[in-house]
Structure formats: C-alpha cells, structure tokens
Image (cartoon, grey):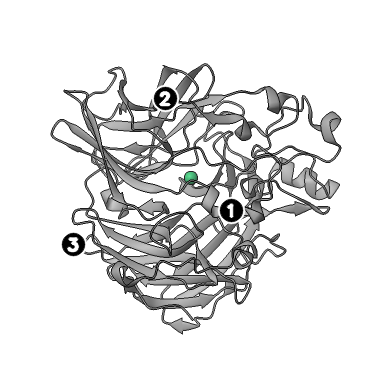
Amino acid sequence: MYQPALTSTSIGASDDFDKKDWASAYENVEQELSNVELKVSTGEIPKNLSGILYKNGPGKLERDGQWVHHPFDGDGMITAIRFDNGIVHLSNSFVKTKAWQEEEKAKKFIYRGVFGTQKAGGFFANAFDLRLKNIANTNVIKLGDELLALWEAASPYSLDPLTLETNGISNLNGVLKKDEPFSAHPRFDSGHHGVSRMVTFGVNAGPKSTIRLMEFALDGEKPGTLIKDRKDTFNGFAFLHDFVITPNWAIFLQNAIDFNPLPFITGQKGAAQCLSSKKNSKGKFLLIPRDSGKFAKEPPRIFEAPEGFVFHHLNAWEENSDVVVESIFYWDFPSIKPNEDFKEIDFNQIPEGILKRSRINLTSKKVSTKVLSKQCCEFGMVNPKCIGIEAKYAWMACTHKKIGNAPLQSIKKINLDSLEERIWNAGPKSFVSEPIMVPINSASEDDGWVLVLVWNGERLSSDLVILNANDLSEKAIIELPLAIPHGLHGNWVDN
Ligand SMILES: [Fe+2]
C-alpha cells in the first residue's frame, strides 16, 4: 500500500494529492474504544517497543449541521496505543471538558471557538461573549500520576492514564491558579542537571506579557513536583506557542504580531483571528535563564529574530558563546479568514513551514540564520535524549513536493550536519501526522522507531505506521479500527 522509502533525490515534485482525500479525515469521531487488541496488517511489532503512544487532536468538528470554522476549534480526543511484547491495544476517549459535556447535552455549539467558530444566532449571540472554551485538544503528556490534555490558553485536564477517564481540570497540586494558562509544549530535559525534568511555561499576554517558567521533577525527585518557578515580563503582545531549552536557557521567539481584540469583542472573529503580522517588523528571541543553570536569577536577554512567524521549534543547544536554535518559519501568520471553508483551503495561498537554524552570539549580540531545507515541513523532533544538546538527526512531517505548500504526506529524516535527507512517502491518498521518535537503548542516536498515525484516504480510516528510525524502512503497518482526524501533538511514555 505504501511507497517504499526513497532518498530525497528520487522523489518527484508533482502535486500528487486530491484535496478531497485530505479533507476526508475531517469527520466527527463517533466511537470510544476501550483496550481493543489490534492486528498487524504488514510486518511485525518490534518486541523492544514497550510503552504507550498518546496522541491528542480535534475529534468533534460538527454539531447540529454546523462545522467548526477551523479544525483547531475541535474538542480534544485522546488516542492511546499500548505496546507490550509485540501485542498492541488501542483505547480512545474525548476529553470530557465542561464545554464538551454542555455541548453534548445541548447538541449544538454553545461556545465560540478561538479560531473563529461562532455560535448560531449571528451578531446578538456572539457579541460580548468573551468566554474561552478550554478544548484540551493540543497535546497530551504524563506528569507524575496524571495524564494531562493540554490547551495553551487554560489549565490542563487530567485523565486516568490507562482508562482515559476524565478526572477534571488539574491545578497540578496547587501550582496553577484558577484558569491559569499552561503551555501545550513542555520540553523534557533528560538530565542536564543530573535528573530528568519537565520544563514548561504559561503566558499572560497583553500590552506587556508575562512568562511563567516552571520546572517539574520527572523521576529521581517526587515526580510531578514543582522545582523551579520564575516570572519575567516583556514589552508587547507575546503569542508564544512553543519554546526550546538548553541546560542554561529557555528560549522563546516573540513573533512580531499585533492583537486587535475589537472584532472578537463584537462577535465577528475568533480571538486568534485578531492576530496579524506587524508590518516591517521583526520578532525577538527571548532568552530566559533556567534557574537550574549557571545564569540562575539573572534577567532575560533579548535579541532580534529573523523575519517570519514561528509556531514550532525543533531543538536548541549551546556552543561556546552561541545559543543555536532550530525553528520552522512561515513568511506570515497562517490563518483561515472568516468567509473561508477550511476544507476548501488553497494550499498555494498558505505560507509553508521552512526549517531554519539561528545562531545567537551572546557576546556580540549578532544573530545569523541559515535555511536547512526548503521543503515545507512541520512537527519536527530529535531523539528525546538530545533535547537541549546538539543533535545529529531530526525526524519531521513534510510535503511530498520539494517547494511550496501542500498537505503533509511524507516523513523525513534529516542529517543536521550534512543536510542529507531520507524520505518515506505515505502515498497519494494518505496523509501523515507528527512523527514520534522512540529511541531504543543504543549508542547510536538514530537507533529506534518512528511512530506515525497516517490518514488512509483509501480506507477512510487511520493506520499506525512503524518505521525504522535510521533508514525509514517500514517495520509494521496496523490498520486501526478508528478514523482519527488530522491531529496535533502526542508523546511516548515508556512502560
Ligand atoms: Fe504545537
């Protein structure tokens, strides 16, 4: 079914997809499965894969005939795929948020979505309704005993890690105030300071924006305990979806973005649709010292960033007096305008994601930037043991064509030194999601597996594909008994 792994030089550059196949993934998830054993369609499950792949993403996209305006407004649905000695089980569940429960009962949307979903009833129904709907749909992580469904503008929802039962909003044992924002992009430090930590943040954005930087114990100390906590305030509106860490720094890119809340207040746009790129303006790198590191308690340092808009970073590291940051840049903030149908978007009109490396010299304050690949990509990761140090390899989702935007249909492994690439193609009717690299105990950085949920447009359902991380050859394909819409982020949790 799938195309064999190819080196990038042998890939065609055609627009090899039908938008209807891509859009066919956007349907409501109608079932919640509990511990269903899966059959392998091709290949075999690696015996050394032992743990759970958790994924989050929008699972409810339509109510009472009304579609969300943007898939990011869809309620979070968690998929858990558990591996144990070659046997695989699947469970999935909606995050039973307060809003999800209310809307299930009402059988219609009763909240506005941040990305432009409006309630029925026009102006009078939407104007001045400024409630935020915590849809818990962006990422899912394990912290201490809790499985947390994350959505950056509010506090996390806690679920049972095995049954996926929703326990309710978590304040992380008193760490978070009521409704406090908590990022959907924590970074896992595998031991820069002797023990593993989860480093994360929350941002209160406004004319001045405050970043709360937090470090939690993972193991070695009481798992889930807050160890470090600092707050720093910066000028300007900060739209910060992601960040990266090194042993001594937490690094943010404050995009050059304006926020005009008036169309949100008057019910014409979702809050995120009120963001726009600031003309002729560059963003800033904000380097906040980690209080575990050698610049603890010092003030942040600020540097001019290259032009462009960044959602996601790949990795960062320190090299002499440089801090090096790899990020996916768009030439403008991508959004879906109020009169557009997300299933009909013209990919050629949407900026593509380009992987770039910025080198920030802390002494001279100079920043230089280099393009690492011109092929549109998203959802990059390095071997988790390399987070915060220089990695040789990265894995990411990318388009099939070499230049310009299109749906993500391929997985790429890139050698970050030589920029040599290797690509696995899902095929013309299939679409990939974020790849999760699971390392195995080995001295080689690229030894392990890459797990990818693929939307199979032929079968109108999802497949789990397991690739060898080193050469992207197919190890196993599992046809799932579940149709999962194009999703967002997830994590692997070792047994
Ligand atoms: Fe993200």
Dot 1 beta carbon under 8 Å from ligand 1: no
Q: Which residue is mark 2?
A: 281
- Mark 1 near mark 2, Cβ–Cβ under 8 Å? no
Question: Which residue is depicted at the point 82% across and 54% down?
Answer: 65
Classify mark 3: helix, strand or loop: loop
| Left or right, residue 146 beside residue 373 | right
Q: Earlier in the sequence, mark 3 or mark 2?
A: 2
Question: Which residue is depicted at the point 16% across and 23% down?
Answer: 363
Question: Which residue is depicted at the point 39% across and 28% down?
Answer: 283
Question: Which residue is depicted at the point 23% across and 23% down?
Answer: 295
Q: Which residue is mark 3?
A: 443
Q: Earlier in the sequence, mark 1 or mark 2?
A: 2
Classify mark 2: helix, strand or loop: loop
User: Which quadrant of the structure image shows residue 465?
Assistant: bottom left
Distance Cα–Cα, label 3 vs label 2: 44 Å
Q: Residue furthest left?
A: 320
Residue 357 showing in the rendered view: yes
User: Looking at the image, is 155 positioned above or below residue 427?
Assistant: above
Please state, as top left, top right, bottom left or bottom right, where the C terminus lies in the image.
Answer: bottom left
Distance Cα–Cα, label 1 vs label 3: 44 Å
Residue in front for this viewpoint, 1 or 140: 1
Q: Position of residue 22 (x, y in %)?
A: 59, 64
Distance Cα–Cα, label 1 vs label 2: 27 Å
